[in-house]
Amino acid sequence: MAKFKIEYDRDGCIGAAVCEAVCPKHWKMADDGKVNLLESTKQDKEEIYIKEIDEADFESMKVAADGCPVKVIHIQNKETGEKLI
Ligand code: SF4
């Protein structure tokens, strides 16, 4: 079962591509200069994208979130509800 929930505010992305460099499994640059969170679900009416990941992908996703200069990538522990970043 997925342990972490990823929330991505695409509106704020400035296309620095740190996330794609360190975590290409989940992030890919799009034609509009912002990244897409691959296989994510878009929330209604907002540029917020949600995805769940397993423990195995946590480290690379954490590096991506830490490295994002505008902090639009957030990680939540699904079991505890704790917001990790
Ligand atoms: S690191 Fe942040 S600003 Fe840069 S492409 Fe990824 S989400 Fe966008």
Image (cartoon, rainbow, N blue to C red):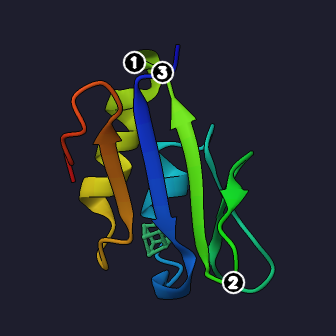
Q: Quote the CA–CA distance across marks 1 and 3.
A: 4 Å
Query: What percent of the width, then of the height, locates residue 60?
Result: 39, 35
Q: Residue at x 46, y 57 (%)?
A: 7
**The C terminus sits in image quarter:** bottom left
Between residues 23 and 77, which one lies in front from this camera angle? Answer: 77
Circle 3 residue: 54
Circle 1 residue: 55
Looking at the rendered structure, the secondary structure element under dot 1 is helix
Q: Earlier in the sequence, mark 2 or mark 1?
A: 2
Crowd around label 3: few <14 · some 14–19 · many ≥20 (10 Å): few
Q: Quote the CA–CA distance across marks 2 and 1.
A: 30 Å
Q: Quote the CA–CA distance across marks 3 and 2.
A: 27 Å
Q: Nearer the viewer, mark 3 or mark 2?
A: 2
Q: Residue at x 48, y 21 (%)?
A: 54
Disc 1 residue type (three-letter): Glu
4 versus 19 height, above or below: above
Q: Is residue 66 left or right of residue 56?
A: left
Is mark 1 in CB contact (under 8 Å) with mark 3?
yes
Q: Is residue 40 left or right of residue 2?
A: right
Is mark 2 in CB contact (under 8 Å) with mark 1?
no
Q: Earlier in the sequence, mark 3 or mark 2?
A: 2
Q: Please give the label number shown on residue 23.
A: none
Between residues 62 and 43, which one lies in front from this camera angle? Answer: 43
Q: Residue at x 29, y 75 (%)?
A: 69
Circle 2 residue: 45
